[in-house]
Amino acid sequence: MAFGPGQSTQVNPLYPTQGYPANSNATQLGAWPKGGTAPSFTSVPAQSSSDPNYWLPIWSGEVINAYDQYNLFEPLVTTETIESGTTKRFPVTGTVGHIGKWNAGVELIGDSSIQNPGWFDISLDERPMAAYFELDDIHLMLTQWDYRAELARQAGLQLSYVRDKQIACMIAKAAFADNREPFGDEYSGMNNANNVVLAPDAKFNVLGLRTASQAERTDAALLLLDYIERYMVRLAEIDATLGDVYCAVTPQAFHDIRALGIARDSGSLLGGAGRPFFGGVAEAGGLGSPLANGMFGIQESLDYMGVKIVKSNHLAQLDHNNVSSGLVTGAASTTANVARSALTSAGKIANQGNVGVVTDLGDAKYNFNWHQHSGGTAPVTPGTGSGASQAGYTVTGAILNPVKALIWQRSAVCSLRLQGMKVESVKDVRRGTYFTVSSIMAGAGILRPELCGAIQGTYTV
C-alpha cells in the first residue's frame, strides 16, 4: 500500500479514488465507485452519487460532439445562433445608383426599388428535431462509458442525418430560386429558368452510379470539373465574392473523381498515361491525399481550382426522391421514408416507375423535388387514383432532370439554431424502462441564391 502526501489512510492502488484524502472515506477502502461518481470526491456534488440523471449533462455533451462530427453541410454554410426568440432578421436598407456623367445642376434623386417589407427573415422550424431511445437499465449509462458513448454516437448521427438533409434541400432550392428584389435575374440561382448557367446534361445521369461503366462514370466526373469551372466563371461575371466554395457529391462520385487519370486497363498505360489527377503528388499539384492514404472520413476533400469537393451519403439517399413534409397517405408506410425502385444501369427510372418520397425532414420549407419532374403527365399523388396502391409518385411521360450534386458558397445559406441541446429522461414504472430524448431547435433559409448551383442529369421517361 502507498501513502499520498499528507495522507494518514492507506489507499488501495486498484481503487485509488477511495480513502483519499485522509479520513474522507476510509471505511470504503477497496470498494467500487458508485454509479455516477467521478474520480475525485471534490468534483462531484453531494447528491450526484444517488441521482440517476447525473449522466445526462455528460451524455448530452457526447451527443453534441457526435452531431458535429457527422454533420457535413452545416459547418459549410453561414451559421447563426440566437439565445431566444424564433427569428433573425436581415434588413435590406437600400440600393446604390450610378450615373455615367453628372452634369452641373443635375439633381441626384434617391430611388429605391425595394419591395416591402424591406428585409428577409430566417426562422427556426416550428418544432425541434429529436433522437430518442429506451433503456431498461439506466446504470449502464452511469458506469459503462463504451455503452453510453455508442448511444451518444447513434443519437448524434440521427440528428445530423436530419439536419444535413435539411440544409442540402435548402441549397438545392436556392439553386432554382428567383433573384431577390431589387436585384436582376443574374442574381437568381444558377439553375433558375431566367439564369440557366448549369444546364442539365445526360452524362450526369450516371454520376456516382455504381452500376454504370467505368468509362461513363469517368466522363461524368470530368464533366463535373467543367461545371465547376462554369460556376467560377459565373461568379466572376457578376463580381461575386470568390471564396469558400464547395461541391458536394456522393461517395461513389467522390472516389470516381479521385481516381481520374488512374489506369483501368492496359490501353490507359500507353504513352506513359495513368498519372492521377488528385493523387496528392507533385505531378497532380497536391490536389488530394496521396493514394497510399485512405479518404474515408466525412470531412475529407479534394481541391479543384479553389473549390473543395466533399462527399455526402445523403445525396445518394435523396436522389430521385421527393421531399414532402407530413405523412404520405395511401403508401406502403405513412411514417417512414418510402423506398424507391432501383435505377437502371444508365441511371434512369422507367416509365410508370416508382419515385420515392422522404417525409421526415420537418417543415414544408425543406420540400424539394430531387428528380425535377417537368412536362408530360404530372405525378400521381399516393392515395388518389392510380397511385393509391403504390408507394411514392408514379412517373408517366415526363422529363426528369435529377439533381446529382450541389455547388455553393458559405454565405449562400444560413443555418439558424437556438442555443443548446435539450436532453430529458423519464422513468416509466409500467414498462420498467427509462425513456430518453435529445432535441435541437434549428432552422434554415436562403441568403444569396446566386451563389448556389445544382448538377442535373436529364432524360425522358
Image (cartoon, rainbow, N blue to C red):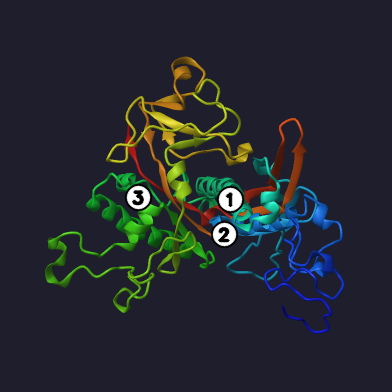
Mark 3 is surrounded, within 10 Å at the Cα level, by few (under 14), some (14 to 19) or many (20 or more) other residues, namely many
Q: Which residue is mark 3?
A: 208
- Compared with 182, 242 (above or below) is below
Q: Who is closer to the viewer here, 8 or 435?
A: 8
For marks 2 and 3, the one nearer the N-term is 2
For marks 2 and 1, the one nearer the N-term is 2
Cβ–Cβ below 8 Å for labels 1 and 3? no
Q: Amino acid at mark 1?
A: Ser
The C terminus lies in quadrant:
top left
Q: CA distance from mark 1 to mark 3?
A: 23 Å
Cβ–Cβ below 8 Å for labels 2 and 1? yes
Q: Is residue 106 left or right of residue 277?
A: right
Which mark is on residue 160? Answer: 1
Q: CA distance from mark 2 to mark 3?
A: 24 Å
The secondary structure type at the circle numbered 3 is: loop
Q: Is residue 450 left or right of residue 433?
A: left
> Residue 308 location, x and y as percent?
45, 64
Q: Amino acid at mark 3?
A: Gly
The secondary structure type at the circle numbered 2 is: helix
Q: Which residue is mark 2?
A: 69
The secondary structure type at the circle numbered 1 is: helix
Mark 2 is surrounded, within 10 Å at the Cα level, by few (under 14), some (14 to 19) or many (20 or more) other residues, namely some
